Amino acid sequence: MRDAWFAGAGIVFGWLMSKAWNDPGCQVGMVILLVMTAVLILAFALAVVGHGRGPQGPGRDEEDERDE
């Protein structure tokens, strides 16, 4: 089912690009949309990957990170 959503979104996005790319004002809007989407996906991926990381090894604590 997820593949059907991806295919549908690709078709709709392709149709929108073909209609909007002829207008210079829409070109700017589409570029902004693409850049902002990429930034949001990257931020989400970094938040998910970095979230909930525990200590690196047995007995390690956040206090052990400093040099003594």
Image (cartoon, rainbow, N blue to C red):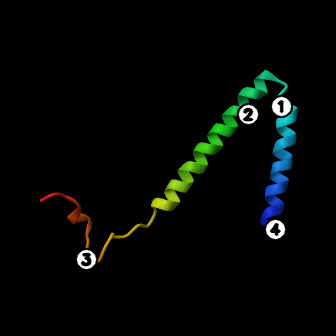
Quarter of the image for residue 7 reads: bottom right
**Mark-to-mark CA distance, 3 and 2:** 51 Å
Distance (Cα) linking label 4 and label 2:
27 Å
Q: Is residue 8 above or below residue 51?
A: above
Secondary structure, mark 1, is helix
Residue under the point 25% across and 76% down: 59
User: What is the C-alpha distance between the residues marked 3 and 1?
Assistant: 58 Å
x then y, percent, for residue 25: 77, 23
Name the amino acid type tagged 2. Met
Dot 1 alpha-carbon crowd within 10 angstroms: few under 14, some 14 to 19, many 20 or more: some
Residue 63 placement (x, y as % from top left): 21, 64
Q: Earlier in the sequence, mark 3 or mark 4?
A: 4
Amino acid on which disc 1 is placed: Ala
Q: Relative to residue 52, is residue 11 drawn left or right?
A: right
Q: Marks 3 and 4, Cα distance to the nearest angstrom?
A: 44 Å
Horizontal and vertical percent position of residue 42: 56, 49
* Residue carrying label 2: 30
| Dot 2 crowding, Cα within 10 Å, few <14, some 14–19, many 20+ | some
Furthest residue in direction left, as rendered: 68
40 vs 54, left or right, is: right
Compared to residue 29, the image places residue 16 above or below, namely below
Residue under label 1: 20
Distance between the alpha carbons at the discs numbered 2 and 1: 8 Å
Residue on which the image places disc 3: 59
Picture residue at 85% right of the left edge, 54% below the top: 8
The quarter holding residue 45 reads: bottom right
